[in-house]
Structure formats: structure tokens, C-alpha cells
Amino acid sequence: MSDPFSNTADPAGIRRQFAGVDLEELAKKHGTPFYAYDADMIRQRCADLSEWDTVRFAQKACSNIAILNLMRHEGVLVDAVSHGEIARAMAAGYQPHGKSGYQEGLPSADPIVYTADIFDRESLEAVVQHGIHVNCGSADMLEQLAERVPGANVTLRINPGFGHGHSQKTNTGGEGSKHGIWHEAVPDVLRRAEWAGLAVTGLHMHIGSGADLDHLATVAESLEKTAHDIGRSLTMISAGGGLPVPYQQDESRADLSGYFTLWDTTRKRLEDSFGHRIRLEIEPGRYLTAEAGILVTEVRATKRQGSKKYLLVDAGFHTLARPVLYGSYHPMSLCPTSTTPPRELESVAVGGPLCESGDIFTQEEGGFVSTRDLPPARVGDFLIIEVAGAYGFVMASNYNSKPFPAEILIDRGSSQLVRARQSADEIFSGEYIPKT
Ligand code: LLP
């Protein structure tokens, strides 16, 4: 397996290139801030999971249609949580229904699956119109679907009563989570599915994002038990997503092959007891794109506030929300515009342009401002925020009427703009002044 930090900065905290492309040139050509993604790194992460029958990308992590198109070429299928994500998947070339990912003897897989706890009206329309398979996180969804698509096959998303995530906000199991059908309600929900005339063909559990593998592994046992409650109609089980990635140098990579073996063994036991093949899916978001993405910003001011030195850059929590939302740590490096050799690192707090004190990239959960050791930076240098390819662009906002940043895909040394920076007009297009 490749070195997790092979795509990050040198030990002195300087990075001048990304995926073989000169960052200063890229910044001068496209302006800042922008996200850049390394296509080869994404391919590598897809390949890491090739033992699984189906890798289904949780596109909420990074849904630019160029990224989805890349996933499609790698044989990765896709998850959608809204009608917008269904439309994106189709715009990227995924067939809305029908079967794909043919493998000898295995039940086939639906290219796009809609996974949610509700149908908003637009999503229900999209599912009906395009014949998309649904992973239901509430019993109400079953009845709403049966009314429109009699006899549909469905997957059930079960909340096993426990969960884990890198933050309480990304823990999706247990009583504190709104997600999934409560495990004790399964018998009742199965009866409701039968009355509604639906066939339960899939079983899915996802207990949280950025969990550790020890917690994730406990899901297999719980899923196996629920699979027996459902019985022989099952042809697919999904381990959900949640695979962690290292955000810090001292974090190790997850043992993926041990994790696969655990799930494969569970699947085989179910096959033996049901007497037919069962497809085994995994549904990662972060794992496939986090390490492949960086956020490039320009340093616009440096200042001292008492004992603290601040670097202020042109990206803020409207560009990357993870630090303000969860106190998330992202590695950082500097792309200096001068060629003078790097001097000693200095401790700095890094903030953005927004009119809000919480607009700080170096913060702990709870909003406490911390610092980072970085090479001394000057206005005009570029600050690179790393491991930002998952839940980066997709959680951007227009707060303070700041535009969405650009996105650039780098493939085999050549860079392409895959999303233009938003213009000011685009920010308020769709707003109207009432006629008097
Ligand atoms: N499947 C389901 C049903 C999910 O809800 C999620 C994530 C995934 C798969 C993918 O999880 P992953 O493999 O990426 O951990 N904004 C947060 C993460 C929220 C995750 C939401 N659901 C963050 O920046 O950490």
C-alpha cells in the first residue's frame, strides 16, 4: 500500500507541487481559493478496495461530476442522498437503473442507490421516474414507495443501536441518531414491507463516519443477526461507509484486508444458510477522496494579536467547514513565492476572511483557537490545506456572499478546471426585488 503522506508536503512544511503540477503556476492561472484533486490517488484508493464485490461511492463526500465520472471508469457504483445527487450521477454517465457490475454467479448491483431517512417530494419523483433502487431508513419510506412503485425491491438501512464517528456529529448509530430503522423494529417493519408488497433484497448498516475499524467491525455481527430476521429474500449486504483516513502523520492506515475478511466470512455464512450467493458492498466516501484533495489559498495578511500570530488567507469556513464544525485537523503546508530556503518554523493561527471569530482553520472542537508550526509566510504566498478532498467543497456555502471556490482535477500531469469559481452575479441569481 502506498504511503498515506506521499502526496503531502516535505518535512520543512513546504510544498511547491501537487500531483506533478506546479502549484504557484496553477494558482496564478486559476486564482485562489481552489480545490485540486489528484486522479491517480483516487484510482489508487479505489484499487485498495478491489476485493469487495461492489464499491459504492458515497458521493456526498465529493460530488463534482468529473470525480463521479472518474469513479465510474474505475468500476465504482454510486450512492445518492437527494434528487440532486441522482441528477449528478446521471450527468456523470451512470445509468439510473438496470443492473451493472456483472460478476460470475453474483446477484447484479444497481448502479445508483438512493439512501435516506425520508423522501422529500422531489427525491421520490426522481426515484419513481428513473426506477432507482432505494435504501430505506424509515418505515414511512416503504409505504410511500409502494404506493408509487408496487412490488419494488428495497434495501433496509438498520440502526443497530450503537454507533461511532470521529465526532458525535458524525455518529449515525444508537438512540442519539435519527438514522436508520431501529433494530428492534425490524420484525414490525418487515411485516409492513410485506403488506405493502415490497421485497426486501438488501440490508445495510452504517454506524458513522471516520469511525475506527474496531467499532466498524462490530457491525458485521449485528448485521448477520438481522439478515436472519429478513431471510432468503436477501441478495445484498452492505457494510456502509465510515472507513477512516489518516489526517495526522502519526495516524496509521486502517487494516483493510482484515476488515474485508471479517465481512466476507459473514457473507459466506449467510450464503451457506440461505443457499444462494450474496453480494457484498462497501460504501465509502472519505476513503476514496480525502487524501486526493487539497485546498489552495493565498495568504492575504499576517498580524499579531498579543502573543498570537495570525495568518489570514482567502479561504474560510465557507470554503472548508470541517474545522469550525468538528474541530477537525487538516495538515497544512506553504507554497512560498520566493525561492529563498525555508527558515525555522513558527507557530501561527490560521484564519479566513469571514466576519466571524470562528473562521479559524486551526481550532479544536469547542472553538478553541490553536496554532500550527509552519514556515514563515508572507502576503502572496500560498497556504495549502491538505487531506481536504472529502467533505470539503461539498460543504461550502455562500456565507458573507463569498463565491464557491474553483475545482481542478489533475490527471497524469495535466490540470483541468472542472468547476469554475462562482461569480458575484451567480451568488444572488434567483433573488428578486418585489415589484411595488
Ligand atoms: N453511507 C452513509 C449512509 C453515510 O451517511 C455516509 C456519510 C457514508 C456512507 C460515507 O461515510 P464516509 O465513508 O465518508 O465516512 N461531514 C462529515 C462527514 C459526514 C458523513 C455523513 N455520512 C465530515 O466532514 O467528517
Image (cartoon, rainbow, N blue to C red):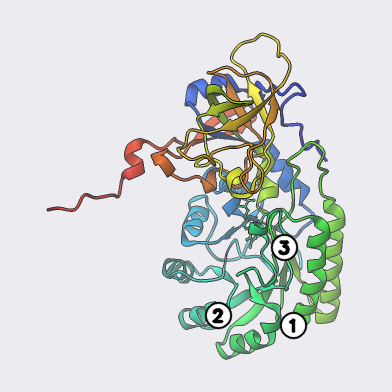
Say which residue label 2 marks. 142
- Disc 2 marks a residue whose amino acid type is Leu
Sequence-earlier tag: 2 or 3: 2
Sequence-earlier tag: 3 or 1: 1
Sequence-earlier tag: 2 or 1: 2
Considering depth in this image, is 111 or 366 the residue closer to the camera? 366
Report helix, strand or loop for mark 3.
strand
In three-dimensional space, the C-alpha distance between marks 2 and 1, rounded to whole angstroms, equals 19 Å
Residue ranking furthest to the top: 340
- Disc 3 marks a residue whose amino acid type is Glu
- Identify the residue at image location x=62%, y=31%: 349
Say which quarter of the image contains residue 137. Answer: bottom right
**Residue 247 appears at what percent x and percent y?**
73, 41
**Residue 84 appears at what percent x and percent y?**
47, 57
Tell me the number on the disc at residue 136.
none
Considering depth in this image, is 56 or 16 the residue closer to the camera? 16
Considering depth in this image, is 418 or 297 the residue closer to the camera? 297
Tell me the number on the disc at residue 281.
3
Say which quarter of the image contains residue 374. Answer: top right
* Mark 1 neighbour class, 10 Å CA radius: few under 14, some 14 to 19, many 20 or more: some
In three-dimensional space, the C-alpha distance between marks 3 and 1, rounded to whole angstroms, equals 18 Å
Tell me the number on the disc at residue 232.
1
- Identify the residue at image location x=56%, y=33%: 351
Asked whether residue 18 appears in the rendered view, the answer is: no
- Identify the residue at image location x=60%, y=77%: 153
